[in-house]
Amino acid sequence: PTAGEIIKLNAEGRRYNLATPCLAAMELRWAEEDPANAMNLPDSVLEMMAAFRLTNNYETTPEWFKRLVVTRADVMARVMSPLITTQIAGKKEHADGLYALAHDPDYAAIAKLITPDILNSFPRKAQKNQLQSLRLLIIALMTRLDKSTQLEIIADRLADKSGDVAQRVYWLTAGLQLAPAIYLEPARQYISHTQARTSHLIALIHEQRERNSPQAALPLAALELMIELLGPQCSPRLSSGFGWVSPAMELARYVEGLISTLAGMPDEKAQLALASLLQHKELKPWEDTLRRAMFDQQLTRRKALFKPASVAQVSSTLANLAPANAADLCALTLDHLQQLGREIRDGNTNDYRQYWREEHPEIEDNCRDRLLSDLKIRLNPLGISAEPEGRYADEKRADIKVSAQGYNIPIEIKREMHKDLWKAIQHQLIARYTRELASDGYGIFLVFWFGGAGQPVAGDGGARPKTAPELQERLQQIVPVSHQQKIAVLVIDCSLRAAGKG
């Protein structure tokens, strides 16, 4: 029989009795002859043998068939394309040879020849048991076809609005991985609507990870979206364990891998993505993992940005002159602010008085300007500038920006009675300013203490602080662990002295 006749009979649920003796004869031919001679048969015979083998698939793949797959992709293509197309049309759940087409690298040349045509014939509305066949075909497309063909097919299928929900999710997921600039927002808008759509995304991802099939490297924005969509569907406690790996465990490991990938990116956007993911209530089970990732990402970023100081810079730093990096600039600025704080509190010139208007604390801007005036006197001779309202990311402004050698340190200032006293470190200093490249995550949160009256409710759950040192210690404790080494808190005591003390 011809290969076409074998395929036709297979579609009817029947087989040729000749199949077994023909397959046995081919085994003998391969065993007794030189491999090259064994395959020296007319194409029609090779096609017949391929059809017999594919429709009578025993567990052990014979060597002659492996040789045929690798050396005669054209013969295999002429058999596999009509066979798979016919079986999909007949609603067969597992089309013969389709799994190998997606996952076996030996089938790469065959997949390149036949995947587009099989996809073109795949029904736009498929039954549930046909969806795995589509997932396998999409994986073959993503791993075997050239980029232009991939994008052309994806665009064509997404342009067809008659397809069912599962297929649309699959194609958007493929597009998200292959061309995120085009498909990121369409995927976000369509898939994030329902859990059912997310489950289809999970099904395709799970199929991709079968046998460690290669996957496209996802850009940052796509990584963030995938974590946002997939994280709520699993738990990090499932990512470890031994023995049989369930789909939920596999998904948890995949999400953990995505988070680790973000942690390994040194750019600022990765830091922002992790911070944004931490705000998602649905990702609460992943909070510890995300916080560890933020810490790791900061180390990655620090290593990437690190520039060894020159001999001249080291000498200048040791001489208390120009700082060599953002860390030096922050430490130097903090040291001078601490000295100013001591002079304001304990100096014999009653400097604290300039922060009061008669018996009332000065407004915040006036306090800032008076401190800035004294700070400039100290920093300007060192080649360091200090200016009010430094412009930072998203057009936000810090109260003071200290700059030198291309580095900037933002200083956020509050009076102790400010309503956002306990929120400003996280929501202003960290979120708005320290993510600037020139700051390298460093910043200073400065509070003017006027005696403690009018304080807002303490943000750490305790009673309102009674002294400036207590407030400083408690504010420092609420700095996120991942920022503890870079965010300094300083409370300057401007409270009125008791009568007889100045």
Image (tube, grey):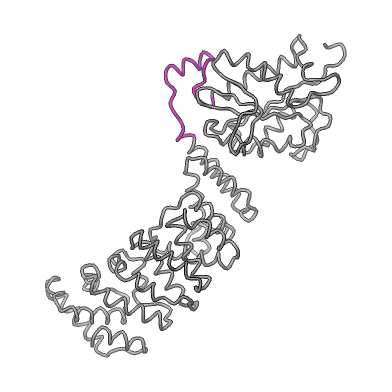
Whole-percent x, y for residue 94 in the image: 40, 77
Question: Would you place residue 269 above or below residue 33 in this image?
Answer: above
Residue plotted at (52% across, 58% down): 252
| Left or right: where 30 falls relative to 108 | left
Indicate the quadrant containing the N terminus: top left, top right, bottom left or bottom right. bottom left
Residue plotted at (32% across, 79% down): 82
Question: Would you place residue 254 above or below residue 108 in this image?
Answer: above
Residue 24 occupies quadrant: bottom left
Whole-percent x, y for residue 205 in the image: 47, 62
Indicate the quadrant containing the C terminus: top left, top right, bottom left or bottom right. top right
The furthest residue to the top: 348
Residue plotted at (31% across, 88% down): 15
The furthest residue to the right: 499
Q: Nearer the viewer, residue 17 or 317?
A: 317
Whole-percent x, y for residue 399 in the image: 66, 28
| Left or right: where 396 falls relative to 78 | right
Q: Nearer the viewer, residue 454 or 121?
A: 121
Question: Would you place residue 375 above or below residue 427 in this image?
Answer: above
Whole-percent x, y for residue 303 in the image: 46, 34
Q: How many marks?
A: 0
Residue 473 forms part of the magenta stretch = no
Instruction: Please give the range of residues in magenta.
Output: 302-327
